Image (spheres, rainbow, N blue to C red):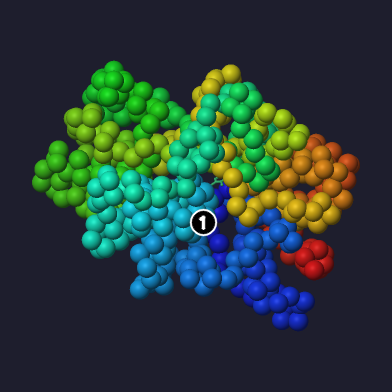
Amino acid sequence: MNAPTSMPSIVPLIPENAPFNAEQRAWLSGFLAGALALDNAGVTALAPSDAPSLQGDDEAEAPWHDPAMPIDERMTLADGKPLARRMMAAMAQQDCGQCGSDCATYSKSIAEQAEERLNLCAPGGKETARMLKKLIEESGGGATSPEERAAKPAPVERNAALGYSRATPVEASFVSRRKLNGEGSEKITNHIEIDLAASGLTYEVGDSLGVFAQNDPALVDAVLAAIDAPGDFPIGGRALRDVLIEDISLALAPDMLFQLISFLTGGSRRLCAQALARGEDPDGDAASLDVLGALEKFAPLRPDPEALVESLEPLQPRLYSISSSPRAHAGRVTLTIDTVRYRLNERDRHGVASTWFSDRLPEGSPLKVYVQKAHGFGLPSTHETPIIMVGPGTGVAPFRAFLQERLAQKAAGGAWLFFGHQREATDFFYREELEGFSAAGALTRLSTAWSRDGAQKVYVQDRMREAGADLWAWLD
Ligand SMILES: Cc1cc2nc3c(=O)[nH]c(=O)nc-3n(C[C@H](O)[C@H](O)[C@H](O)COP(=O)(O)OP(=O)(O)OC[C@H]3O[C@@H](n4cnc5c(N)ncnc54)[C@H](O)[C@@H]3O)c2cc1C
């Protein structure tokens, strides 16, 4: 699932006289509020019979569990709660799985001192990591002896079977990439095929694939030039350049790097680096300072390469919704990946994993992957249950998998897909396949929205509003 950019608070959209009890009404209101706020960054699916309950004890104990709420408000709501709950409030509330589990499990592991890594909440970023550190310090520090730590339950991910956790990736093989956009599109989205046969991995529709990608060697070379270090400088028996390509995040500069820089500079530059290390923004450029940007801002710098590597964060795996069904592609998995490129502070920036897949990874190369099982996201258990899928942009990925599965199951239930993107002529991913699903009866209704085709921008949420009565009947 694409990481949602923002989700609204729950709003009462379901009429009081609708045939639902309070709990069902609250769940549906939350679902619709999320769905109607979706733009190109979000996806969701509704399988009414299997819909997870968002109400109940957990919800009552975690009223801040709303990605749209700023961290300060979340922390206020969590005030006075047990440490694990306050730690959960510090996270980005997306349950996106990038940490290896969900916000509640990850925070519990940290509070129980079974997990030492405070930087795994990708959407929360530095803000979350800083708050977690502060909470640990306030609670008397997180330091435990190795014996004490060994006695704690290990985080969920470390207990997972080989290939089913970010801690236990296995080797797969990159088969091919195919551009999905037509000539003239503003986007580059690739259909990626990966061979899982040798890995023995299996998956179900709704699951995601975790991928360990590599940094762009050109960016690594620029970092080496900025610190005037040779690429073959030995770090733990490996070349510095390889370590930077394979293991180290060169994204937003971490606080530790600014601390290191503050030791290497003096005067106002030291004060500036110290302020940045405290999370302040003295020059108004903190949000644009990746590792290279930070090194160039304080140039010339000659940090010890080993100290530099220690001050940086590990490169994290990226998750991608699986866009195939194992019934249609035994031993293979496909992904649908948008290439991330943007310009910031007069430098072109390239998303690590998406540009690795689109530009750098040679076909036939090995790669490290794992299957991240979905929680509460999948097809209903009965084939007759109708499904409504809302998947603009690459959000369509898991629903391509759902439709392949439904076709293989010869499912009788209706299936309605809302798909949208910029332009019909260039951005209608999987058009022929979707038409094939329609012809075969696996897709019974397709509603599309093109935001750049007309004078007025139309999004999937507009199509949902237009079809409100029918949508209501399907939900009913
Ligand atoms: C469960 C799950 C499923 C996912 N499924 C898919 C999928 O099916 N398809 C897909 O394409 N993605 C998917 N994603 C997102 C994916 O995991 C990656 O986050 C995405 O591909 C970017 O990774 P990257 O390494 O290329 O970019 P990174 O190197 O991680 O860079 C991305 C970061 O760059 C920054 N950024 C991006 N654009 C701008 C801008 N214009 N200005 C300033 N900063 C910017 C943001 O901070 C962003 O977080 C999914 C994520 C999750 C959690």
**Res 20 quadrant in image:** bottom right
Q: Is residue 231 visible?
A: no
Residue 87: image location, x then y, percent: 38, 61
**Res 410 quadrant in image:** top right
Left or right: 84, with 58 as reference point: left
Label 1 CB, ligand 1: below 8 Å?
A: yes
Residue 315: image location, x then y, percent: 40, 36
According to the picture, the residue beneath numbered tag 1 turns out to be 94
Residue 349: image location, x then y, percent: 44, 37
Compared to 376, does 436 lie above or below? above
Q: Residues within 10 Å of mark 1 (few under 14, many from 20)?
A: many
Left or right: 80, with 436 as reference point: left
Give the tally of numbered discs: 1
- The residue sitting at 68% across, 68% down in the picture is 28
The quarter in which the C terminus is drawn is: bottom right
Residue 189: image location, x then y, percent: 62, 36
Q: Is residue 182 visible?
A: yes
The amino acid pointed to by label 1 is Gln
